[in-house]
Image (cartoon, helix red, strand yellow):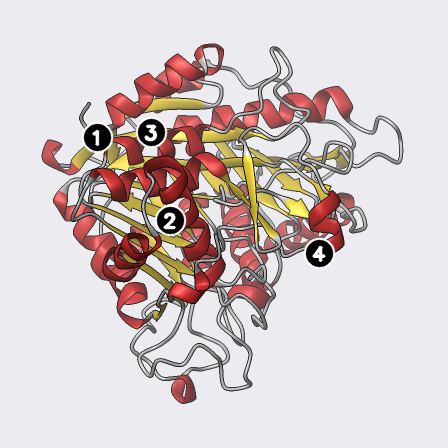
Protein backbone atom coordinates (compact mmCIF):
# COMPACT_ATOMS: atom_id res chain seq x y z
CA UNK A 1 0.00 0.00 0.00
CA UNK A 2 1.21 3.55 -0.65
CA UNK A 3 2.36 5.73 2.23
CA UNK A 4 -0.41 8.34 2.17
CA UNK A 5 -2.70 10.12 4.60
CA UNK A 6 -5.63 8.45 2.83
CA UNK A 7 -4.21 5.01 3.67
CA UNK A 8 -3.56 5.96 7.30
CA UNK A 9 -7.12 7.32 7.53
CA UNK A 10 -8.50 4.05 6.14
CA UNK A 11 -6.43 2.11 8.69
CA UNK A 12 -7.83 4.18 11.55
CA UNK A 13 -11.40 3.73 10.28
CA UNK A 14 -10.81 -0.02 10.20
CA UNK A 15 -9.23 -0.17 13.68
CA UNK A 16 -11.48 2.38 15.41
CA UNK A 17 -14.71 2.38 13.36
CA UNK A 18 -16.83 4.02 16.06
CA UNK A 19 -14.41 6.89 16.61
CA UNK A 20 -14.18 8.55 13.20
CA UNK A 21 -14.49 12.32 13.81
CA UNK A 22 -14.15 11.63 17.53
CA UNK A 23 -10.51 10.46 17.84
CA UNK A 24 -9.40 11.21 14.29
CA UNK A 25 -10.54 12.93 11.12
CA UNK A 26 -9.27 13.93 7.69
CA UNK A 27 -9.15 17.29 5.92
CA UNK A 28 -7.99 17.77 2.35
CA UNK A 29 -7.51 21.54 2.32
CA UNK A 30 -4.71 22.02 4.87
CA UNK A 31 -2.36 24.93 4.32
CA UNK A 32 0.99 25.87 5.89
CA UNK A 33 2.65 29.18 5.07
CA UNK A 34 6.07 30.66 5.81
CA UNK A 35 8.58 29.73 8.49
CA UNK A 36 8.07 32.71 10.81
CA UNK A 37 4.26 32.41 11.00
CA UNK A 38 3.77 28.64 10.87
CA UNK A 39 6.84 26.85 12.32
CA UNK A 40 7.45 27.40 16.04
CA UNK A 41 10.55 25.77 17.47
CA UNK A 42 12.36 26.59 20.66
CA UNK A 43 14.95 27.89 21.07
CA UNK A 44 14.03 29.55 17.76
CA UNK A 45 16.80 30.12 15.23
CA UNK A 46 19.65 29.48 17.68
CA UNK A 47 20.99 26.12 16.50
CA UNK A 48 24.25 27.58 15.21
CA UNK A 49 24.91 29.59 18.38
CA UNK A 50 27.54 28.30 20.77
CA UNK A 51 26.67 27.92 24.44
CA UNK A 52 28.70 30.90 25.64
CA UNK A 53 26.74 33.27 23.35
CA UNK A 54 23.26 32.03 24.23
CA UNK A 55 21.12 34.63 26.08
CA UNK A 56 19.01 33.94 29.17
CA UNK A 57 15.92 35.74 27.72
CA UNK A 58 14.65 36.96 24.38
CA UNK A 59 15.51 33.85 22.39
CA UNK A 60 12.13 32.14 21.88
CA UNK A 61 9.23 34.60 22.00
CA UNK A 62 7.85 33.45 18.65
CA UNK A 63 5.34 30.78 19.88
CA UNK A 64 3.74 33.11 22.44
CA UNK A 65 3.51 35.99 19.97
CA UNK A 66 1.92 33.71 17.38
CA UNK A 67 -0.76 32.68 19.88
CA UNK A 68 -1.72 36.32 20.48
CA UNK A 69 -1.75 37.14 16.76
CA UNK A 70 -4.16 34.30 16.01
CA UNK A 71 -6.40 34.74 19.07
CA UNK A 72 -7.06 38.45 18.50
CA UNK A 73 -8.39 37.76 14.98
CA UNK A 74 -11.11 35.32 16.10
CA UNK A 75 -14.69 36.07 15.10
CA UNK A 76 -16.77 33.58 17.11
CA UNK A 77 -15.07 30.54 18.67
CA UNK A 78 -11.76 29.66 20.33
CA UNK A 79 -10.65 26.44 22.03
CA UNK A 80 -7.44 26.54 24.07
CA UNK A 81 -6.40 23.17 25.49
CA UNK A 82 -3.15 22.79 27.41
CA UNK A 83 -1.60 21.28 30.54
CA UNK A 84 -1.41 23.25 33.79
CA UNK A 85 -1.54 27.01 34.21
CA UNK A 86 0.06 29.27 31.57
CA UNK A 87 2.81 31.46 33.00
CA UNK A 88 4.88 34.52 32.14
CA UNK A 89 4.91 35.72 28.54
CA UNK A 90 2.70 32.83 27.41
CA UNK A 91 -0.07 33.91 29.75
CA UNK A 92 0.41 37.59 28.95
CA UNK A 93 0.19 37.02 25.19
CA UNK A 94 -2.92 34.86 25.50
CA UNK A 95 -4.56 37.44 27.77
CA UNK A 96 -3.52 40.28 25.43
CA UNK A 97 -5.28 38.46 22.60
CA UNK A 98 -8.43 38.04 24.71
CA UNK A 99 -8.36 41.71 25.75
CA UNK A 100 -8.16 42.69 22.07
CA UNK A 101 -11.28 40.58 21.45
CA UNK A 102 -13.10 42.28 24.32
CA UNK A 103 -12.19 45.66 22.82
CA UNK A 104 -13.37 44.57 19.36
CA UNK A 105 -16.93 43.90 20.49
CA UNK A 106 -17.08 40.67 18.49
CA UNK A 107 -19.23 37.92 20.09
CA UNK A 108 -16.52 35.34 20.78
CA UNK A 109 -16.78 32.33 23.09
CA UNK A 110 -13.50 31.01 24.49
CA UNK A 111 -13.23 27.54 26.04
CA UNK A 112 -9.95 27.30 27.97
CA UNK A 113 -9.23 23.85 29.40
CA UNK A 114 -6.26 22.99 31.63
CA UNK A 115 -5.22 19.41 32.27
CA UNK A 116 -3.96 19.09 35.84
CA UNK A 117 -1.24 16.59 36.59
CA UNK A 118 -1.85 14.24 39.50
CA UNK A 119 0.03 15.11 42.66
CA UNK A 120 -0.16 18.89 42.39
CA UNK A 121 -2.62 21.29 44.06
CA UNK A 122 -5.74 22.34 42.20
CA UNK A 123 -5.46 25.38 39.94
CA UNK A 124 -7.12 28.66 40.92
CA UNK A 125 -9.32 29.09 37.86
CA UNK A 126 -11.57 31.68 39.54
CA UNK A 127 -8.56 33.84 40.40
CA UNK A 128 -7.16 33.48 36.88
CA UNK A 129 -10.44 34.78 35.47
CA UNK A 130 -10.57 37.61 38.02
CA UNK A 131 -7.10 38.74 36.98
CA UNK A 132 -8.17 38.63 33.32
CA UNK A 133 -11.34 40.59 34.19
CA UNK A 134 -9.24 43.24 35.96
CA UNK A 135 -7.07 43.67 32.86
CA UNK A 136 -10.12 43.90 30.58
CA UNK A 137 -11.71 46.46 32.91
CA UNK A 138 -8.55 48.58 32.81
CA UNK A 139 -8.68 48.55 29.00
CA UNK A 140 -12.21 50.04 29.19
CA UNK A 141 -13.89 48.21 26.30
CA UNK A 142 -16.96 49.97 24.95
CA UNK A 143 -19.16 46.87 24.72
CA UNK A 144 -17.44 43.53 25.32
CA UNK A 145 -19.23 40.43 24.07
CA UNK A 146 -16.51 38.03 25.21
CA UNK A 147 -17.40 34.86 27.14
CA UNK A 148 -14.51 32.90 28.66
CA UNK A 149 -14.94 29.45 30.23
CA UNK A 150 -11.93 28.15 32.17
CA UNK A 151 -11.74 24.63 33.60
CA UNK A 152 -9.36 22.27 35.30
CA UNK A 153 -9.69 18.67 34.11
CA UNK A 154 -8.52 15.33 35.54
CA UNK A 155 -10.00 11.84 35.79
CA UNK A 156 -9.19 10.33 39.20
CA UNK A 157 -5.40 10.43 39.66
CA UNK A 158 -4.52 8.60 36.49
CA UNK A 159 -5.66 10.62 33.46
CA UNK A 160 -5.45 14.29 32.52
CA UNK A 161 -5.18 16.35 29.38
CA UNK A 162 -1.66 16.50 27.94
CA UNK A 163 -2.65 18.00 24.56
CA UNK A 164 -1.52 21.47 23.53
CA UNK A 165 -3.72 23.21 20.96
CA UNK A 166 -5.43 26.44 20.01
CA UNK A 167 -8.30 26.06 17.51
CA UNK A 168 -9.91 29.21 16.14
CA UNK A 169 -13.14 29.56 14.15
CA UNK A 170 -12.77 26.09 12.62
CA UNK A 171 -10.04 27.42 10.33
CA UNK A 172 -6.80 27.98 12.29
CA UNK A 173 -5.00 25.44 14.47
CA UNK A 174 -1.78 25.70 16.49
CA UNK A 175 -0.61 22.40 17.98
CA UNK A 176 2.55 20.61 19.00
CA UNK A 177 4.63 19.96 22.08
CA UNK A 178 4.81 23.37 23.76
CA UNK A 179 3.32 23.75 27.19
CA UNK A 180 2.66 27.40 28.08
CA UNK A 181 5.44 27.49 30.67
CA UNK A 182 7.66 30.55 30.56
CA UNK A 183 10.48 29.15 32.72
CA UNK A 184 10.84 26.03 30.55
CA UNK A 185 10.85 27.69 27.12
CA UNK A 186 11.49 31.43 27.30
CA UNK A 187 14.17 31.70 29.99
CA UNK A 188 17.53 30.16 30.86
CA UNK A 189 18.35 26.70 29.46
CA UNK A 190 15.22 26.45 27.26
CA UNK A 191 13.59 23.15 26.36
CA UNK A 192 13.85 22.10 22.72
CA UNK A 193 10.39 21.66 21.19
CA UNK A 194 8.28 22.20 18.08
CA UNK A 195 4.72 23.28 17.31
CA UNK A 196 3.12 24.32 14.02
CA UNK A 197 0.20 26.31 12.70
CA UNK A 198 -2.17 24.63 10.23
CA UNK A 199 -4.95 26.46 8.37
CA UNK A 200 -8.08 24.89 6.91
CA UNK A 201 -10.65 22.31 7.92
CA UNK A 202 -8.08 20.42 10.00
CA UNK A 203 -8.78 22.99 12.75
CA UNK A 204 -12.24 21.52 13.24
CA UNK A 205 -10.52 18.48 14.72
CA UNK A 206 -9.21 20.67 17.54
CA UNK A 207 -12.74 21.81 18.34
CA UNK A 208 -14.10 18.26 18.24
CA UNK A 209 -11.38 16.97 20.54
CA UNK A 210 -12.17 19.83 22.93
CA UNK A 211 -15.88 18.92 22.73
CA UNK A 212 -15.13 15.50 24.25
CA UNK A 213 -13.17 17.00 27.13
CA UNK A 214 -15.85 19.61 27.84
CA UNK A 215 -18.54 16.91 27.81
CA UNK A 216 -16.59 15.30 30.65
CA UNK A 217 -16.30 18.65 32.47
CA UNK A 218 -20.05 19.28 32.20
CA UNK A 219 -20.84 15.83 33.58
CA UNK A 220 -18.33 16.09 36.44
CA UNK A 221 -18.24 19.80 37.29
CA UNK A 222 -17.46 19.93 41.03
CA UNK A 223 -18.49 16.31 41.63
CA UNK A 224 -17.45 15.79 44.37
CA UNK A 225 -17.10 19.37 45.57
CA UNK A 226 -13.38 18.92 46.21
CA UNK A 227 -12.83 17.00 42.96
CA UNK A 228 -10.21 17.67 40.32
CA UNK A 229 -12.61 18.78 37.55
CA UNK A 230 -14.37 22.13 37.75
CA UNK A 231 -15.27 25.12 35.57
CA UNK A 232 -15.69 28.88 35.91
CA UNK A 233 -17.25 31.38 33.50
CA UNK A 234 -16.40 35.04 32.88
CA UNK A 235 -19.31 36.75 31.13
CA UNK A 236 -19.27 39.99 29.07
CA UNK A 237 -20.19 41.99 32.19
CA UNK A 238 -17.00 40.64 33.83
CA UNK A 239 -18.97 38.58 36.36
CA UNK A 240 -17.68 35.12 37.31
CA UNK A 241 -19.81 32.05 38.04
CA UNK A 242 -19.22 28.29 38.29
CA UNK A 243 -20.84 27.16 35.04
CA UNK A 244 -19.46 25.12 32.17
CA UNK A 245 -20.19 26.01 28.54
CA UNK A 246 -23.24 24.50 26.83
CA UNK A 247 -22.60 21.92 24.09
CA UNK A 248 -21.09 23.59 21.05
CA UNK A 249 -23.36 24.12 18.07
CA UNK A 250 -22.22 22.24 14.97
CA UNK A 251 -23.61 25.03 12.79
CA UNK A 252 -20.36 27.00 12.89
CA UNK A 253 -18.56 24.13 11.13
CA UNK A 254 -20.20 25.09 7.84
CA UNK A 255 -19.42 28.77 8.40
CA UNK A 256 -15.78 27.99 9.13
CA UNK A 257 -15.13 25.81 6.09
CA UNK A 258 -13.79 28.78 4.08
CA UNK A 259 -11.91 30.37 6.97
CA UNK A 260 -8.41 29.49 5.76
CA UNK A 261 -6.52 31.97 3.57
CA UNK A 262 -6.59 31.85 -0.19
CA UNK A 263 -3.64 29.93 -1.56
CA UNK A 264 -2.50 28.09 -4.64
CA UNK A 265 -4.12 24.65 -4.69
CA UNK A 266 -0.67 23.08 -5.08
CA UNK A 267 0.25 24.35 -1.60
CA UNK A 268 -2.66 22.54 0.05
CA UNK A 269 -2.34 18.99 1.31
CA UNK A 270 -4.34 16.25 3.03
CA UNK A 271 -3.94 15.90 6.78
CA UNK A 272 -5.27 13.89 9.70
CA UNK A 273 -5.99 15.09 13.19
CA UNK A 274 -5.27 12.30 15.66
CA UNK A 275 -6.12 12.03 19.35
CA UNK A 276 -5.48 9.65 22.22
CA UNK A 277 -8.37 8.94 24.60
CA UNK A 278 -6.60 8.50 27.93
CA UNK A 279 -8.98 7.14 30.55
CA UNK A 280 -12.41 8.29 31.67
CA UNK A 281 -13.48 10.49 28.73
CA UNK A 282 -14.32 8.18 25.82
CA UNK A 283 -16.62 5.67 27.50
CA UNK A 284 -19.40 5.15 24.94
CA UNK A 285 -17.95 2.78 23.92
CA UNK A 286 -14.76 2.60 25.95
CA UNK A 287 -11.56 2.85 23.96
CA UNK A 288 -7.87 2.68 24.89
CA UNK A 289 -5.90 2.87 21.65
CA UNK A 290 -4.44 6.19 20.52
CA UNK A 291 -4.82 7.20 16.88
CA UNK A 292 -1.28 8.59 16.54
CA UNK A 293 0.45 5.35 17.51
CA UNK A 294 -1.80 3.29 15.23
CA UNK A 295 -0.95 5.62 12.35
CA UNK A 296 2.80 5.63 13.12
CA UNK A 297 3.02 1.84 13.27
CA UNK A 298 1.07 1.52 10.01
CA UNK A 299 3.21 4.22 8.42
CA UNK A 300 6.37 2.29 9.32
CA UNK A 301 4.92 -0.74 7.54
CA UNK A 302 4.60 1.29 4.32
CA UNK A 303 7.72 3.49 4.54
CA UNK A 304 10.69 2.58 2.35
CA UNK A 305 13.44 5.14 2.86
CA UNK A 306 13.66 6.90 6.21
CA UNK A 307 12.13 7.46 9.61
CA UNK A 308 13.31 10.66 11.29
CA UNK A 309 12.14 11.52 14.80
CA UNK A 310 12.70 14.17 17.45
CA UNK A 311 11.34 12.88 20.75
CA UNK A 312 11.45 13.40 24.48
CA UNK A 313 12.23 9.72 25.05
CA UNK A 314 11.38 6.19 23.90
CA UNK A 315 11.33 4.47 27.29
CA UNK A 316 9.42 5.08 30.49
CA UNK A 317 11.23 6.65 33.46
CA UNK A 318 13.91 4.30 34.76
CA UNK A 319 12.79 2.05 37.63
CA UNK A 320 14.67 0.48 40.48
CA UNK A 321 15.48 -3.20 40.03
CA UNK A 322 12.78 -4.18 42.56
CA UNK A 323 10.06 -2.02 40.99
CA UNK A 324 10.97 -3.16 37.49
CA UNK A 325 10.70 -6.80 38.50
CA UNK A 326 7.33 -6.46 40.25
CA UNK A 327 5.47 -3.88 38.11
CA UNK A 328 2.96 -5.12 35.56
CA UNK A 329 1.13 -2.87 33.08
CA UNK A 330 -2.61 -2.49 33.51
CA UNK A 331 -5.20 -1.51 30.96
CA UNK A 332 -2.62 -0.08 28.57
CA UNK A 333 -3.55 0.30 24.88
CA UNK A 334 -0.40 -1.37 23.51
CA UNK A 335 1.77 -4.31 24.56
CA UNK A 336 4.87 -3.22 26.44
CA UNK A 337 8.33 -4.75 26.69
CA UNK A 338 10.86 -4.13 29.44
CA UNK A 339 14.58 -3.59 28.97
CA UNK A 340 17.28 -2.06 31.15
CA UNK A 341 14.89 -0.85 33.84
CA UNK A 342 12.43 0.91 31.50
CA UNK A 343 9.33 -0.03 29.52
CA UNK A 344 8.84 0.46 25.79
CA UNK A 345 5.90 0.23 23.37
CA UNK A 346 6.44 -3.18 21.75
CA UNK A 347 4.68 -2.65 18.38
CA UNK A 348 6.73 0.50 17.82
CA UNK A 349 10.07 -1.20 18.54
CA UNK A 350 9.09 -4.24 16.48
CA UNK A 351 8.14 -2.09 13.51
CA UNK A 352 11.40 -0.17 13.74
CA UNK A 353 13.12 -3.55 13.41
CA UNK A 354 10.83 -4.70 10.59
CA UNK A 355 11.31 -1.40 8.71
CA UNK A 356 15.10 -1.83 8.81
CA UNK A 357 14.89 -5.52 7.87
CA UNK A 358 12.51 -4.98 4.94
CA UNK A 359 14.37 -2.03 3.40
CA UNK A 360 18.08 -2.75 3.02
CA UNK A 361 19.08 0.90 2.67
CA UNK A 362 16.51 2.53 4.97
CA UNK A 363 17.68 4.70 7.86
CA UNK A 364 16.27 5.35 11.33
CA UNK A 365 17.27 8.54 13.14
CA UNK A 366 15.97 9.55 16.58
CA UNK A 367 17.03 12.69 18.46
CA UNK A 368 16.35 12.46 22.20
CA UNK A 369 16.78 14.30 25.48
CA UNK A 370 19.94 13.75 27.45
CA UNK A 371 19.10 10.65 29.56
CA UNK A 372 20.01 12.30 32.88
CA UNK A 373 20.87 15.69 34.38
CA UNK A 374 18.63 17.65 32.01
CA UNK A 375 17.97 21.29 32.88
CA UNK A 376 14.27 20.56 33.43
CA UNK A 377 14.36 16.78 33.95
CA UNK A 378 12.73 15.63 30.71
CA UNK A 379 15.09 12.69 30.18
CA UNK A 380 13.98 9.40 31.70
CA UNK A 381 17.34 7.90 32.52
CA UNK A 382 17.11 5.56 29.52
CA UNK A 383 20.58 4.96 28.13
CA UNK A 384 20.80 5.08 24.36
CA UNK A 385 22.74 1.81 24.54
CA UNK A 386 19.61 0.25 26.09
CA UNK A 387 17.53 1.30 23.08
CA UNK A 388 20.12 -0.10 20.67
CA UNK A 389 20.22 -3.34 22.64
CA UNK A 390 16.42 -3.68 22.60
CA UNK A 391 16.22 -2.94 18.89
CA UNK A 392 18.78 -5.64 18.15
CA UNK A 393 16.89 -8.10 20.40
CA UNK A 394 13.71 -7.56 18.39
CA UNK A 395 15.62 -7.99 15.11
CA UNK A 396 16.75 -11.37 16.38
CA UNK A 397 13.34 -12.34 17.79
CA UNK A 398 11.51 -11.56 14.54
CA UNK A 399 14.08 -12.27 11.83
CA UNK A 400 16.81 -14.34 13.55
CA UNK A 401 19.33 -11.56 12.90
CA UNK A 402 22.72 -12.43 14.38
CA UNK A 403 24.52 -10.10 16.77
CA UNK A 404 27.16 -9.22 14.19
CA UNK A 405 24.56 -8.47 11.52
CA UNK A 406 22.49 -6.46 14.00
CA UNK A 407 25.59 -4.49 15.01
CA UNK A 408 26.28 -3.68 11.35
CA UNK A 409 22.71 -2.40 10.86
CA UNK A 410 22.82 -0.34 14.05
CA UNK A 411 26.10 1.37 13.18
CA UNK A 412 25.38 1.93 9.49
CA UNK A 413 21.68 2.77 9.44
CA UNK A 414 20.51 3.69 12.97
CA UNK A 415 21.37 7.12 14.38
CA UNK A 416 20.45 7.72 18.03
CA UNK A 417 21.45 11.22 19.11
CA UNK A 418 21.10 13.68 21.96
CA UNK A 419 20.58 17.43 21.54
CA UNK A 420 23.64 19.66 21.15
CA UNK A 421 24.60 22.99 19.57
CA UNK A 422 27.17 23.91 16.94
CA UNK A 423 30.05 23.40 19.37
CA UNK A 424 28.88 19.83 20.02
CA UNK A 425 28.21 20.41 23.70
CA UNK A 426 25.25 18.58 25.21
CA UNK A 427 25.29 20.80 28.31
CA UNK A 428 24.47 24.45 28.96
CA UNK A 429 26.97 26.84 30.55
CA UNK A 430 25.98 25.72 34.06
CA UNK A 431 26.49 22.04 33.21
CA UNK A 432 22.79 21.13 32.90
CA UNK A 433 22.08 18.89 29.90
CA UNK A 434 19.75 19.87 27.05
CA UNK A 435 16.14 18.65 27.20
CA UNK A 436 14.05 17.68 24.18
CA UNK A 437 10.24 17.72 24.53
CA UNK A 438 9.32 17.34 20.83
CA UNK A 439 6.91 14.72 19.52
CA UNK A 440 7.93 15.01 15.87
CA UNK A 441 8.35 12.35 13.22
CA UNK A 442 8.51 12.24 9.43
CA UNK A 443 8.45 9.13 7.21
CA UNK A 444 10.13 9.16 3.79
CA UNK A 445 10.38 12.97 4.10
CA UNK A 446 6.66 13.13 3.35
CA UNK A 447 4.27 11.99 6.11
CA UNK A 448 4.90 14.17 9.16
CA UNK A 449 3.46 14.33 12.69
CA UNK A 450 3.52 17.29 15.06
CA UNK A 451 1.60 17.00 18.32
CA UNK A 452 1.61 16.18 22.02
CA UNK A 453 1.59 12.36 21.98
CA UNK A 454 4.81 10.75 23.20
CA UNK A 455 6.32 7.50 21.95
CA UNK A 456 6.89 6.08 25.44
CA UNK A 457 4.43 4.55 27.93
CA UNK A 458 3.33 6.69 30.89
CA UNK A 459 4.77 4.72 33.78
CA UNK A 460 5.71 6.76 36.84
CA UNK A 461 7.43 4.78 39.60
CA UNK A 462 5.18 1.75 39.92
CA UNK A 463 2.08 3.74 38.93
CA UNK A 464 0.64 4.30 35.49
CA UNK A 465 -1.28 7.01 33.64
CA UNK A 466 -3.02 7.37 30.28
CA UNK A 467 -3.41 10.92 29.02
CA UNK A 468 -5.51 12.76 26.45
CA UNK A 469 -3.38 13.79 23.45
CA UNK A 470 -3.74 15.58 20.10
CA UNK A 471 -1.70 16.08 16.95
CA UNK A 472 -1.70 16.49 13.18
CA UNK A 473 -0.28 14.12 10.55
CA UNK A 474 0.22 15.87 7.21
CA UNK A 475 1.13 14.61 3.75
CA UNK A 476 3.48 17.49 3.14
CA UNK A 477 4.19 18.91 -0.32
CA UNK A 478 7.88 19.57 -1.05
CA UNK A 479 7.64 23.25 -0.04
CA UNK A 480 6.39 22.39 3.46
CA UNK A 481 8.81 19.48 3.88
CA UNK A 482 11.70 21.79 2.95
CA UNK A 483 10.58 24.41 5.47
CA UNK A 484 10.26 21.90 8.31
CA UNK A 485 13.50 20.10 7.53
CA UNK A 486 15.64 23.20 6.90
CA UNK A 487 13.97 25.29 9.59
CA UNK A 488 14.03 22.63 12.30
CA UNK A 489 14.91 18.98 11.85
CA UNK A 490 18.15 19.17 9.86
CA UNK A 491 19.58 21.52 12.50
CA UNK A 492 18.74 19.03 15.25
CA UNK A 493 20.26 16.21 13.21
CA UNK A 494 23.39 18.10 12.24
CA UNK A 495 24.19 19.18 15.79
CA UNK A 496 23.10 16.02 17.59
CA UNK A 497 25.65 13.81 19.33
CA UNK A 498 25.40 10.18 18.18
CA UNK A 499 25.80 7.06 20.33
CA UNK A 500 27.35 4.11 18.48
CA UNK A 501 26.55 0.49 19.24
CA UNK A 502 29.17 -1.90 20.60
CA UNK A 503 29.01 -5.68 20.60
CA UNK A 504 29.25 -5.64 24.39
CA UNK A 505 26.02 -3.56 24.52
CA UNK A 506 24.04 -6.39 22.90
CA UNK A 507 23.34 -8.49 25.96
CA UNK A 508 20.83 -11.05 24.66
1 and 4 marks in contact (CB < 8 Å): no
Above or below residue 359? Residue 413 is below
Residue topped by disc 3? 298
Q: Earlier in the sequence, mark 2 or mark 3?
A: 3
Instruction: Give the CA distance from mark 3 to mark 4.
Output: 34 Å
Residue 154 in which image quadrant: top right
Above or below residue 179? Residue 171 is above
- The residue lying at 61 percent from left, 65 percent from top is 377
Q: Earlier in the sequence, mark 1 or mark 2?
A: 1
Mark 4 or 2, closer to the camera: 4
Mark 2 or 3, closer to the camera: 3
The quarter of the rendered structure image containing the N terminus is top left
Q: Earlier in the sequence, mark 1 or mark 4?
A: 1
- The residue lying at 34 percent from left, 69 percent from top is 496
Mark 1 or 2, closer to the camera: 1
Instruction: Give the CA distance from mark 1 to mark 3.
Output: 9 Å
Instruction: Give the CA distance from mark 1 to mark 2.
Output: 17 Å
Residue topped by disc 4? 321
The answer to whether residue 216 is seen in the rendering is: yes
Q: Earlier in the sequence, mark 4 or mark 2?
A: 4
Q: Which mark is residue 440?
A: 2
Q: Which mark is residue 3?
A: 1
Instruction: Give the CA distance from mark 1 to mark 4.
Output: 41 Å
- The residue lying at 68 percent from left, 35 percent from top is 159
Near mark 3 (Cα within 10 A), the count class, few <14, some 14-19 or many ≥20, is: some
Q: Is residue 24 left or right of residue 289?
A: left
Q: Which mark is residue 112?
A: none
Residue 228: image location, x then y, percent:
79, 37
Amino acid sequence: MPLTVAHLHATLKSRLPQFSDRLFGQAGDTFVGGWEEYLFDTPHGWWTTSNHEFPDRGHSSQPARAMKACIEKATHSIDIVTMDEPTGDFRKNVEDGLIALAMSGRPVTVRFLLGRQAGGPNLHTWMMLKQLADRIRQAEPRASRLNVYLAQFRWESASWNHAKLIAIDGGVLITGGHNMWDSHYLARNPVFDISMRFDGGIARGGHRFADALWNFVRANNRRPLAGATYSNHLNPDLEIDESAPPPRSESFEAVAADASPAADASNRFPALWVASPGWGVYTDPRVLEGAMMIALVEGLKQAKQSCKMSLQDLGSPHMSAVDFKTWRPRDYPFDLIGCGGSWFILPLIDNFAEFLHRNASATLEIILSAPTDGAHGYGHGVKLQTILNLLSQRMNAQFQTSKNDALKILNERVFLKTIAFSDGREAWRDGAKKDNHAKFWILDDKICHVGSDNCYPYVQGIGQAALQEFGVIGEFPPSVTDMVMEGYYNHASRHGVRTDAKLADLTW
